[in-house]
Image (tube, rainbow, N blue to C red):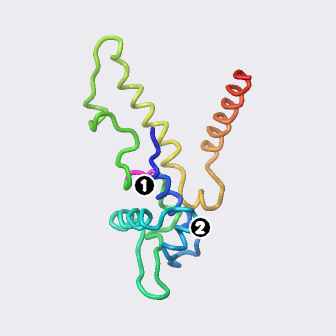
Amino acid sequence: MRISAKVDYAVRAMAQLAAAPEGQPIKAEDIARAQDIPLKFLLGILNDLKRAYLVRSQRGAEGGYALMRPADEITLADVIRVIDGPLANVHDQSLSELSYAGPAKRLREVWMAVRASLRVVLETTTLADLAAGDLPDEVKELASTYQAEERRQRAKRR
């Protein structure tokens, strides 16, 4: 899975909104500055999130952007799907429609497993988890496994 700059910025912006007192709007300029996101790019992202009813905007001196729902009801998968579409996409087809021949016959199952593993992380981690810095145990475990593997790989290269 490739995580685009747009997805990275969107999740960071949503985490910033989740960290604000519930319902309190934050100006786009403040989000951009806090997360080092180009303002013009951020405004487009916020517009996409607004059309998907994940954020709302409020005009005026006290205006800005706020989450439409509580942060514990919005998953990272929700944000990613708004910005980039399905979590794991193969040729813009449903995985159930794919079929392969010969030695690649079982590849559809691999793509299904990839999508399922992404869901384990992205559909269980909410903006509230991210903002609080308290990730679900299974996410922490996977991250720890990844870090251990990275250390092993670095040690082999030395």
Q: Residue at position x 68%, y 38% from top?
A: 144
Q: Residue at x 31, y 33 (%)?
A: 95
Give the answer, above or below, for where 140 lies relative to 60: above
- Nearer the observer, 33 or 88: 33
Q: Amino acid at mark 2?
A: Ala
Query: Which amino acid, mark 1?
Result: Asp
Badge 2 is on which residue? 34
Residue 136: x %, y % from top left: 61, 49
Q: Secondary structure under badge 1?
A: helix
Q: Quadrant of the N terminus?
A: top left
Residue 103 circle label: none
The residue positioned farthest toward the top in the image shown = 102
Q: Which residues are magenta?
A: 77-81
Instruction: Give the main secondary structure of the magenta stretch.
Output: helix
Q: Quadrant of residue 148?
A: top right
Q: Position of residue 118 (x, y in %)?
A: 48, 40
Q: In this rendering, which labeled residue sits more in front, label 1 or label 2?
A: 2
Q: Secondary structure at mark 2?
A: helix
**Contact between labelled residues 2 and 1, with CB atoms less than 8 Å apart:** no
Please name the residue shown 43% across and 87% down the image.
Answer: 60
* Neighbourhood count class around disc 2 (C-alpha, 10 Å): few under 14, some 14–19, many 20 upward: few
Precedes in sequence: disc 1 or disc 2: 2
Q: Residue furthest bottom?
A: 61
106 on left or right of 124: left
- Measuring from the top left, give residue 93's x and y in whole percent: 26, 36
Task: Locate the C terminus and report the quarter of the image it occupies.
Answer: top right
Report the residue marked by disc 1: 78
